[in-house]
Amino acid sequence: MTAVLGFITDTEMLLMADSAYHAGCRRVLDALPKIFVHGAALIGVAGSVRHGQIVQYHGPAIESDGKEAEPLRTLMAWVDDLRRCFHRHGYLGRDKDHQTETLGEDEELLVAYAGTLWTIGTNFQVIRHGRGPSAIGCGTQAARAAMLALLAREPSDFDYGLKVEALMIRAMEATATVDVDVAAPFVLVRMAR
């Protein structure tokens, strides 16, 4: 139950998340962080609260090694360290064939690093996103579609630096309208590229 929306401008990386969580059979609106600065990256978390807490409080930081020309290599090394961290905390499960340790079925990360958005999936695959918005969580499709629609309405000389936050809020409001598991207030975290 989450929507984390990410966008990269010429000068900054932005992640926005909703505030809804499940606690047993009830929905709770809480200030638990779904997005946070972690070393040289912004990280957004979808899935279990515990999953996010392990990443934020026990996970290795993504540090800039001065080789931003090879951010995939840096993230792959980080993911290996993160997998070991989840293992130490007893958090990994097994895939349906019991071959590989994985996260829960709906747990993923949206990482803004080196001016690019990346998704870390349940089996720790690293996916680089192209230009434009990206999202994770149950509101993925709605958030991304709403943001793309809003961007398409703007002229080509659109000033992203001033208006992108407003567009992200509108996209998240639209997502909350069509997805009962996404709710305001929305939290934005930004970091210079």
Image (cartoon, grey):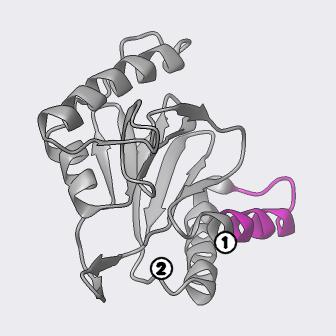
**Left or right of 130: which side holds 62?**
left
**Prevailing secondary structure class for the magenta stretch in the rendered image:** helix
Cβ–Cβ below 8 Å for labels 2 and 1?
yes
In percent of width and height, residue 90 lies at 15, 42
- Residue 17 in the image: above or below residue 113: below
Viewer-closest of 117 and 119: 119
What is the span of residues highlighted in magenta in the rendered image?
144-159
- Marks 2/1: CA–CA distance: 10 Å
Q: Residue at x 32, y 76 (%)?
A: 21
Among the 4 quarters of the image, the one containing residue 161: bottom right
Residue to which mark 2 is pinned: 182
In percent of width and height, residue 83 lies at 29, 30
- Residue 46 in the image: above or below residue 91: below
Q: Amino acid at mark 2?
A: Val
How many C-alpha atoms fall within 10 Å of the one at disc 2: few (<14), some, or many (≥20)?
A: many
Q: Earlier in the sequence, mark 2 or mark 1?
A: 1
In percent of width and height, residue 191 lies at 41, 44
Residue positioned most to the front: 97
Image quarter (top left, top right, bottom left or bottom right) of the N terminus: bottom left
Q: Amino acid at mark 1?
A: Ala
Among the 4 quarters of the image, the one containing residue 84: top left
**Left or right of 66: which side holds 126?**
right
**Left or right of 170: which side holds 131?**
right
Viewer-closest of 45 and 166: 45
Residue to which mark 1 is pinned: 142
Among the 4 quarters of the image, the one containing residue 151: bottom right
The secondary element bearing badge 2 is classed as loop
**Left or right of 70: which side holds 49?**
left
